[in-house]
Each structure stands twice: as C-alpha cells, then as structure tokens.
Image: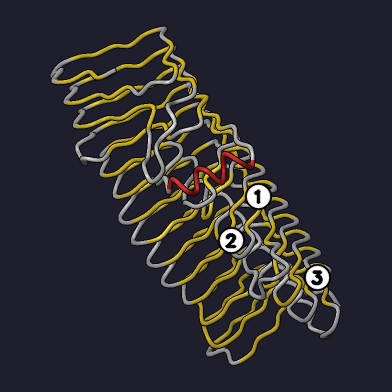
C-alpha cells in the first residue's frame, strides 16, 4: 500500500496490515492509531524489508498500535522527517534459530525504529520486547543525527550486536521513567551503545540484569559523549564472556573523551573483570550522592576501575564492594586526577592484595577526604 503526495493530513485508524508494506511519501501530517502490523513480507536475500516506510514527512504519530513482525518496522531514509511519536505502542519480534540465521544472510540494517536527521522524535509509554538483531546494532532503536525523547517505556528481553538502543553521530537523547531489563549485547552495551559527539540524559531509569559479553553491561559510551544519569538504578548487570580477557564496566563503560555525571544513582551487584560497576579510560567521571553496593570485579576495582581518567566522588557511599586482586572499592591506574570528598567506605574487600578501599598506581595527583575509613 502506497500513500503518496499527500501534503496535508493522513489518518489511518483501527486497521490491520498483514504481509504487506505501507509506504508514506510526501505526507505533511500522518496519524496512525489503533492499528496492527502483522508479519511483514519476507525479503529476498541481500535485501531489507520494512513494514512501514516513511519518506519526506513533517509529522508522524503512531498511537495504541502493535507491531508483531519478523521484518524491519520503521525507516526514515531521506532525512526530512521532522517529528515522530510512538505512544502506547508495542513492538515485538519473534525468532527461532533458523530465522535468525536467515536474517543474518539478508544483512538487514535495522529491526525496530530507525531515525536519521529527525528534529523531534518521541517514544512514549511504548514497549519493545524480544527483538533480535544478531548482526547489527540497535535492535529496538537506532538513532543518528537526531533529537529523541523516550518516556515511560520498556525495553525488555531484546538482543543486538551492540546496544538494543544505538545512538550515533551528533544525537541528543533524553530517556525518562524507562526500564531496561534482561537485554543482551553480543559485544558492547547491553542496553545502550552511544558514540560520536552525542549527548544522553537518563532520569529515573532502571537498568537491571542486562548483559554484554565484552564491555558496558548497561551502557557503553565512546568518543566525545556526554552522559547524565540522574536517580537511576543499575542492578545485577554483568559482562560475562569467558573467552574475552578485558571484560570491563559491569554497568558503565566510558572511553575516549567521555564525560559522565552520576547524580543520586545507585549501582548494586554489578559484575565485570575490571570495574565491577564503572570502567573509565581517558574521560571524566563525577559521582555525587551515589551508592555503590556489593559490586564485584574479577580483576581490579570492585566499584570503579580507572585508567588515565579524572574521577571525583563526592558524598558517595562505597559499601561491601569487592575485587579479586586489588582496589575493593576504587582502582586508579596509569595516571589521572582523582578526588574523593566526604565519601564513605565500608567493608570493601579484595582477595589477594591487602588494598581494601583504594589502590593507586602511577597516579599524577590524588586527594582523599573521607568521612569514614574502616580499620
């Protein structure tokens, strides 16, 4: 079905699309409400197939609709979509092993929502569940050079190569009151993968039991990225590939000019080899009024492991974190500036080295001001 050259208004209501593609071209305002998209057409080998294509639209709103399909859902490719909303929308992917292998042969670029050069995108009260994109990044959302707000939504049980939400190249994204649970990345960023001069703010979000085989079990950030985590919970996230030697960042992996502000956030029971909760390399990390509780590193830095970074912990609590080698709470290595102000360290432990709280090696400058240091 093709709707073309509609310059003013198009509304699709209470409809079912089965085994077909809907294409919207040159639509000024489009509203899709109470619709169901079921099982898109199967693409030929080497091709990508979308259930919904949008070209040159000023505004697109999708409300109270369901996408239950095996092919890609939404794509904006000509960089002229100004505003997009997903409200009360459920997007579900069902796969078995055979279909995953087939999709890998098709080399699809996106499974869920693809946004490029969207000036005002919105995903509200929507659910992304069981979406699998084995060869690609961003099985649920891929956002490039766009502005996107996500609120009151759920991302549960999804899988991708890197990040079920992938953010790239000059993108600004705000995520509020949203949960990320039981998502899985084959390499980096169990929930979110972000790079390339982009900004992300997470407010009152939950990241729980996400997994990345290599680095950044909840969030992986690289190359000039600014991150704010405000009142967020990171719990039971883990990096677990037994054959990868540098599993790092049980909650956050930050590298290459990344600035991260964690404000009143909690990191609980996260696990990696380096940095049970946070791994920092050549960036800036500021923790204010945060709690790090029972995070564990198989190597160094039960809560935080930092290489050549700048780290400030202010009025934060490090309680019962552990590491196998050293730095039960904090491990600072290969230079950097480190400051701890009015922070509390309680019963942090390591197994081999008697450095329960803070291990510093080759550090340029360090200032430690503690309220409590257990004997």
Q: Residue at x 37, y 46 (%)?
A: 143
Packing grade of label 3 (10 A; few <14, some 14-19, many >=20) is: many
**Label whose residue precedes the other's in the sequence (2 or 1):** 1
Q: Which mark is residue 348?
A: 3
Relative to 136, say whether 343 is above or below.
below
Residue at the (43%, 35%) spot, across then down = 72
Q: Is residue 59 left or right of residue 300?
A: left
Quadrant holding the C terminus: bottom right
Q: Residue at x 59, y 56 (%)?
A: 186
Is label 1 in a helix, a strand or a loop?
A: loop
- Identified at 75% across, 58% down, the residue is 293
Q: Earlier in the sequence, mark 3 or mark 2?
A: 2
Residue carrying label 1: 210
Where's residue 226, x and y in %? 41, 59
> How far, Cα to Cα, is label 3 from label 2?
22 Å
Assess whether mark 2 and mark 3 are in contact (beta carbons under 8 angstroms).
no
Mark 3, secondary structure of its residue: loop
Distance of label 3 from label 1 (alpha carbons): 24 Å
């Amino acid at each position: 079905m093709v709707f073309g050259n509609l310059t003013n208004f198009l509304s699709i209501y209470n409809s079912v699309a089965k085994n077909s593609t809907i294409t919207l071209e040159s639509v000024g305002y489009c509203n899709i409400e109470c619709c169901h998209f079921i099982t898109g057409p199967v693409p030929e080998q080497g091709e990508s197939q979308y259930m919904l294509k949008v070209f040159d639209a000023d505004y697109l709103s999708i409300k109270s609709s369901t996408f239950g399909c095996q092919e890609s859902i939404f794509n904006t490719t000509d960089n002229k979509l100004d505003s997009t909303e997903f409200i009360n929308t459920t997007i579900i992917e069902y796969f078995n092993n055979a279909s995953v292998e087939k999709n890998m042969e098709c080399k699809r670029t996106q499974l869920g929502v693809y946004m490029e050069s969207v000036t005002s995108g919105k995903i509200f009260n929507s659910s992304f569940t069981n979406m699998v994109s084995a060869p690609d990044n961003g099985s649920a959302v891929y956002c490039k050079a766009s502005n996107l707000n996500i609120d009151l939504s759920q991302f549960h049980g999804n899988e991708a190569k890197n990040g079920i939400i992938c953010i790239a190249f000059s993108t600004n994204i705000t995520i509020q009151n949203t949960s990320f649970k039981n998502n899985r990345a084959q390499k980096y960023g169990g929930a979110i993968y972000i790079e390339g001069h982009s900004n992300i703010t997470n407010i009152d979000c939950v990241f729980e039991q996400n997994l990345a085989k290599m680095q950044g079990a909840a969030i992986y950030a690289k190359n000039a990225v600014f991150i704010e985590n405000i009142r967020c919970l990171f719990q039971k996230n883990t990096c677990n590939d037994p054959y990868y030697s540098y599993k790092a960042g049980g909650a956050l992996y930050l590298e290459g000019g990344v600035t991260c502000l964690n404000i009143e956030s909690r990191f609980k029971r996260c696990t990696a080899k380096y940095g049970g909760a946070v791994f920092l390399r050549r960036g800036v990390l500021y923790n204010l009024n945060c709690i790090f509780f029972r995070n564990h590193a198989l190597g160094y830095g039960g809560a935080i492991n930092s290489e050549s970074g700048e780290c400030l912990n202010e009025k934060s609590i490090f309680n019962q974190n552990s590491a196998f080698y050293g730095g039960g709470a904090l491990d600072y290595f290969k230079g950097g500036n480190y400051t701890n102000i009015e922070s509390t360290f309680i019963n942090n432990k390591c197994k081999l080295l008697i450095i329960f709280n803070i291990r510093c090696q080759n550090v340029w400058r360090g200032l430690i001001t503690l309220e409590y240091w257990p004997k």
